Image: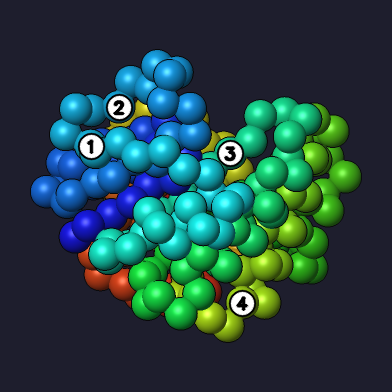
Amino acid sequence: MRITVFGATGNVGGRVVAEALARGHQVTAVVRDPAKPHGLPSAAALTVGDARNAEDVARIAAGQDLVITATRPAPGSEHELPAATRGLLAGLAGTGVRLLAVGGAGSLTIPGRGGLTVVEDPGLPAEILPIARACGEQFDLYRADAHVDWTYLSPAAVLEPGERTGRFRLGRDELLVDADGLSAISMEDLAVALLDEAEQPVHRRTRFTAAY
């Protein structure tokens, strides 16, 4: 497939690029500032663009089979996440190009808590709230959209660099936890889950989650 990745220089995005290339796909990595070091594989084609700009999105997505967005704003710039979502949805509307989005875990419900979501949990650290709320707004924008073939992937509560095992569970709207109550997945395995969905779509116009 011809795959374009927004947020390609980020922790998750870089692993998505690597996973897609390892599977033999043609990858275009989008960067906002070509002058900054990016550390991307030479096999990935680079292009300059901004997910917040619908014209950029439409131009870059032309002729592509799939767009993946793994953008994650820096602390203090959480407002950029909904803005990027609006740009992506506007730029892809009516094109037929699929959109896979890496989102957040905040809107997942906590098992056994009567429908309480992660972001509503009083125990959630205060420093996590801004990005969790931005991800919630991001997910609401996808759910309200009727013009793009989108899929939204919520990671586990703990998402960190680690190993690529290829072994994890999938769910829908509830946080997946292990026998010890931990919800976690490596960034490498999240990329595997995303590319599995890219190659064999199951969750079209809906959300799914992945965790150990």
Which sits earlier in the primary sequence, circle 4 or circle 3?
3
Give the class, few, some or many, for how many residues have Cα within 10 Å of label 1's Cα (few <14, many ≥20).
Answer: many
Mark 4 to mark 3 CA distance (whole Å) = 21 Å
The N terminus sits in image quarter: bottom left
Taking depth in this image into account, of 125 and 16 the one nearest to the observer is 16
Q: Tag 1's secondary structure?
A: loop
Is 172 on the left-hand or right-hand side of 134? left
Q: CA distance from mark 2 to mark 3?
A: 17 Å
Q: Position of residue 201 (x, y in %)?
A: 31, 72
**Tag 4 secondary structure:** loop
Between disc 2 and disc 3, whose residue precedes?
A: 2
- What's the CA distance linking mark 2 and mark 1? 7 Å
Residue 162, how many percent across, how many down?
38, 28
Question: Where does label 1 land, which residue?
Answer: 44
Q: Secondary structure at mark 2?
A: loop
* Horizontal and vertical percent position of residue 57: 47, 56
Query: What label does residue 72 carry, if any?
Result: 3
- Distance (Cα) linking label 1 and label 3: 20 Å
Whether residue 113 is visible, yes or no, is: yes
The residue that appears at 67% across and 67% down in the rendered structure is: 141
Q: Residue 188 appears in which quarter of the rendering?
A: top left
- Which amino acid type is marked by label 1? Ala
- Of callouts 4 and 1, which one flags the residue occurring earlier in the amino acid sequence? 1
Which numbered circle lies on residue 40?
Answer: 2
State which mark lies toward you, 1 or 3. Answer: 1
Q: Are marks 2 and 3 in contact (CB under 8 Å)?
A: no
Is 193 placed left or right of 115 in the picture? left
Horizontal relation, residue 21 to residue 100: left or right: left
> In the image, what residue type sits under mark 3?
Arg
